[in-house]
Amino acid sequence: MSRKRKTIIHITVSAALVITGVIVMIALTASSPELQKIKPSAPAPMVQVIKIKTGPKPIIIRGEGTVRPLKEIDLVTQVGGKIVHTSPSLVNGGKFSKGDSLLSINPIDYELAVTLAKAKVRNSESNLKIVQEEALVAREEWRAHYSDISHTGKEIPPLVAKEPQLAAARSSLDADRADLKKAFLNLERTVLKAPFNGRVSRKSVDIGQYVTPGQPLARLFSTEAAQIALHLEDKDLFWFDVPGFTPGAGSGSPATVHAGIAGHELVFSGRVVRAEGELDERTRMITVIVEIDKPYATKPPLAIGLFVTVDIMGRVLPDAAVIPRAALRQGNIVWTVNDQGILSFRTVRVALYQGEEIVIESGLRDGEIVVFSSLKTATDGMTVRRAVEKD
């Protein structure tokens, strides 16, 4: 067989195989069913939830402020002279009790003034006795000289009875006694005593210094009580009692003061005692005063100037719930989820915002599930998947 004939045979066989394959493919394609496109369903969105617990909830109004003394005065001298003694307590931070002698001014000049005043009083007393005796003699002489019937019952003339002289002598004695009293008072004022239990915040004198009347010598503050001024919004005062400001005749709501000092976290009890007379025109805030008794009774103490946090205990809501701030939607709406994963919109009544939490007065029931995560699109009645519940 020639080479040319072999090539023709190969080409013919190859063409036959190709044609046969195409025919078989067309037949298989025509006989197989058409494939249908199936669109997979989108999974329900996942949400983070919290389980609601309702019950009695005290409203706590929180504020911050600086501890200030209830009483603070400048120790001022009423007499002048050289300081001859100071108490060891008369130093910055020194502690003293009511009636303690804090410093003394040289009393010699004032002791001499007392001696001179006493002498004047004795002299005036002597003059008064002399005038009284002279008046008595003059009265007797007048009665003896005018003892006839025509003058019976007649009044003795004032000049004869030396009444003007008696009045002058008595006035002079009163004036000298007043000078003596003033001399004793000035002598007493040479010793300056503490008017209350307290501490020294500033001292500006020492032994040997000459001081003049009216000169401030030190600044003292009382440790019997301290006060904290809290600047609160007007609506906050709805929840607690401020004597003389809010309705009712309450004694003021209790408060808890939290302070950190010397590495210790301290807690003190106080009470709301009053509100300042007017609102701040710029901030529209009301200043409420909380008072704490005996701030220096503990170690470390509730020191003056310390910045503290104050929690005022307000009214108790009988059936309230607390939710994260993120769970409240616009218009006071929250999203609840039932056991089937159905989302529902619920309107609630907000009582108070407390930091990252919100106190809900009504609108939620105990045990309900609330969503606190966000969704791009949320509709009432849609299905969601719940993540692990947060207590």
Image (tube, rainbow, N blue to C red):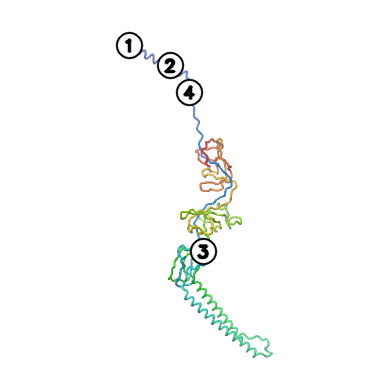
Sooner in the amino-acid sequence: mark 1 or mark 2: 1
The reply to whether discs 1 and 4 touch (Cβ–Cβ < 8 Å) is: no
Residue topped by disc 4: 35
Q: Nearer the viewer, mark 2 or mark 3?
A: 3
Q: Residues within 10 Å of mark 2 (few under 14, many from 20)?
A: few
Residue sitting at the far right:
149
Q: Residues within 10 Å of mark 4 (few under 14, many from 20)?
A: few
Tell me which amino acid carries mark 4.
Leu
Vertical position of residue 37 compared to residue 174: above or below: above
Q: Residues within 10 Å of mark 1 (few under 14, many from 20)?
A: few
Give the Cα separation between the discs numbered 1 and 2: 27 Å
State left or right for residue 92 relative to residue 6: right
Tell me which amino acid carries mark 1.
Lys
Indicate the quadrant where residue 123 lies.
Answer: bottom right
Residue topped by disc 3: 197
Give the Cα separation between the discs numbered 1 and 4: 45 Å
Residue 6: which numbered mark, if any?
1
Tag 1, which secondary structure? helix
